């Protein structure tokens, strides 16, 4: 086949009008919806727990059921979008996302809710897989692309941390189902506008790696199940050990398959490029720490500090505002700074934020968390803008979908692991402290065992002193003492969870700095080799 024919085959639409403004508007509104839904449910978790009498495991899956399809399928959908058209994939994803949102408003059980959240996550994966590649084509010039990515990063950062604010207002005024129903009219409008976008160039030779998606998704599901069920089944139980072994084997099989597949899900050559490993570490770590922790912080504000969902949302506004400002300023002012410097600095800020949110006292108010939210917002915003730009440096323009989707996958892996891991720590400490605190109360021996178990489980589900609302009439005189036990258990659990997040953040900074330094040394050594040869 001639080169002219090949060009016509792989890029039939390069001369079509790019309509950059329309593409930017549509993509940013769609991504705002996607990222908002990843965190908006944090404001609804307390009401969902009450309506369905859900355990902490069920609440964790409300978030992880959304994150895991994003992690496991975004690379496959990026490949399909490259082959059949990114606009087509974007519109399809919005239709799936909107339809699932409508179905979520009619959920009757926590299991049904979790399943529909997974369907919603499938639609979100289609959207995320095509968003950045669409911008890359619409803004081919470096300066214009940097500005567009900066806006995109600011929208992502703002939406991610604005979720509790918007969700709080909706839940307080209209109930928890409104956080899903609000997506329906917005989704329909986005679909109608997206149909006017130009289609991008296609690569018909691309093939989807469904086996790779299956192995990756299966490994993540098994691993998250192990983390969420470890407290109830026992960490040394046969079931948990089996789940961990299955997760490890499936993920090893995934990596092995990627090295042999003709059309791999993940381009292994990207991993060999300088800076990839450090960027990957930080992409996972910032989601597994501060972003995952904000969901439990929302439950703490409502259950222990006693705020309504709206009041809770308003108190995390500083995090949202600083993240949006930091993302825009990073894209504009830090263009000349290498991402191997910006990424570790951003992760240091996230780690410091986690540290500042710890050491909560029994008389602490919400203002205790304010310094951490301000520092964390700066860190999250700078990381969002920097990681988006960095992801495009590891692949050519025709492979932009795979590059951006790879880091989208890593971020969602971080969120899924963080929710499961931090949630396991919170639940373990809360249950342990609630059980010991309950046993220390005078007359606790007269309380039926099933009521004790219910109390401990609800405190472990981050209900705080709201647990006393279900205390039977004959034990009403014990309500103040029970509320103190629940609050103290929740505070100890939050401190333990924040400490774990701080340690994870610190370790990730050290690992990222080491990998960036090793990569820089390797590049420097390779650049000197030709000189030695010529001499």
Image (cartoon, helix red, strand yellow):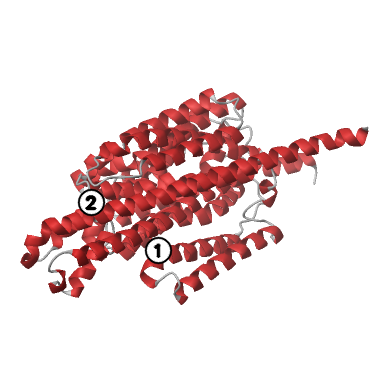
Crowd band around label 1 with a 10 angstrom C-alpha radius: few (<14), some (14–19), many (20+): many
Residue 13, how many percent across, how many down?
62, 37
Q: Residue at x 39, y 72 (%)?
A: 233
Residue 446, how many percent across, how many down?
12, 73
Question: Tags 1 and 2 in contact by the CB under 8 Å rule?
Answer: no
Image disc number at residue 228: 1
- Provide the residue designation for mark 2: 303
Q: Residue at x 29, y 38 (%)?
A: 368
- Give the spatial CA distance, label 1 vs label 2: 21 Å
Q: Residue at x 44, y 65 (%)?
A: 225
The vertical placement of 418 against 247, above or below, is above
94 and 451: which is toward the camera: 451
Crowd band around label 2 with a 10 angstrom C-alpha radius: few (<14), some (14–19), many (20+): many
The vertical placement of 293 against 438, above or below, is above
Residue 350, how many percent across, how many down?
45, 39
Q: Residue at x 27, y 45 (%)?
A: 361
**Quadrant assignment for the C terminus:** top right
């Amino acid at each position: 086949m001639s080169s002219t024919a090949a060009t016509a085959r792989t890029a039939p639409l390069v001369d079509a009008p790019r309509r950059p403004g329309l593409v930017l508007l549509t993509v940013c509104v769609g991504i705002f919806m996607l990222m908002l839904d990843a965190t908006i449910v944090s404001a609804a978790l307390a009401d969902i727990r009450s309506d369905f009498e859900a355990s902490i495991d069920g609440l964790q899956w409300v978030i992880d059921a959304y994150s895991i399809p994003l992690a496991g399928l975004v690379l496959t959908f990026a490949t399909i979008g490259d082959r059949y058209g990114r606009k087509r994939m974007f519109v399809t994803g919005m239709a799936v996302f909107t339809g699932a949102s409508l179905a979520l408003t009619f959920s009757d059980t926590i299991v049904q809710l979790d399943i529909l959240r997974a369907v919603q996550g499938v639609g979100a994966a289609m959207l995320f897989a095509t968003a950045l590649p669409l911008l890359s084509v619409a803004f081919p010039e470096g300066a214009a692309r940097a500005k567009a990515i900066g806006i995109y990063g600011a929208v992502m950062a703002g939406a991610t941390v604005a979720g509790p604010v918007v969700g709080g207002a909706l839940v307080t005024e209209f109930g928890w189902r409104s956080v899903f129903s609000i997506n329906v009219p917005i989704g329909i409008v986005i679909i109608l506008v997206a149909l006017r976008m130009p289609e991008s160039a296609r690569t018909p030779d691309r093939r989807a790696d469904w086996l790779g998606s299956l192995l990756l998704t299966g490994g993540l599901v098994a691993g998250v199940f192990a983390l969420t069920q470890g407290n109830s089944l026992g960490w040394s139980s046969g079931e948990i050990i089996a789940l961990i072994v299955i997760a490890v084997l499936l993920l090893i099989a995934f990596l092995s398959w990627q090295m042999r597949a003709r059309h791999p899900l993940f381009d292994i050559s990207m991993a060999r490029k300088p800076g990839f490993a450090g960027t990957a570490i930080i992409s996972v770590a910032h989601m597994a720490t501060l972003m995952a922790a904000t969901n439990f912080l929302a439950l703490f504000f409502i259950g222990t500090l006693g705020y309504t969902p709206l009041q809770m949302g308003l108190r995390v506004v500083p995090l949202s505002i600083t993240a949006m400002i930091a993302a825009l300023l990073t894209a504009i002012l830090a263009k000349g700074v290498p991402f191997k410097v910006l990424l570790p600095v951003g992760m240091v800020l996230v780690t410091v934020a986690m540290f500042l949110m710890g050491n909560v006292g029994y008389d602490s108010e919400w203002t205790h968390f304010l310094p951490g939210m301000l520092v964390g917002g700066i860190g999250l915003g700078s990381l969002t803008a920097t990681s988006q730009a960095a992801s495009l440096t590891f692949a050519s323009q025709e492979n932009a979908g795979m590059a951006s989707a790879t880091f989208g996958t890593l971020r969602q892996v971080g969120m899924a692991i963080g929710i499961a891991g931090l949630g396991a720590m919170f639940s373990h400490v809360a249950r342990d402290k609630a059980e010991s605190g309950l046993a220390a109360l005078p007359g606790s021996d007269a309380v039926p065992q099933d009521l004790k178990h219910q109390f401990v489980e609800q405190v472990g589900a981050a209900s705080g002193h709201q647990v006393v609302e279900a205390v039977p009439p004959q034990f009403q005189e014990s309500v103040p003492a029970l509320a103190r036990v629940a609050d103290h258990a929740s505070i100890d659990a939050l401190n333990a969870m924040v400490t774990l997040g701080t340690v994870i953040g610190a370790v990730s900074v050290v690992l990222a700095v080491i990998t960036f330094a090793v990569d820089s040394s390797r590049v420097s050594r390779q650049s000197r080799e030709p000189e030695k040869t010529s001499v």
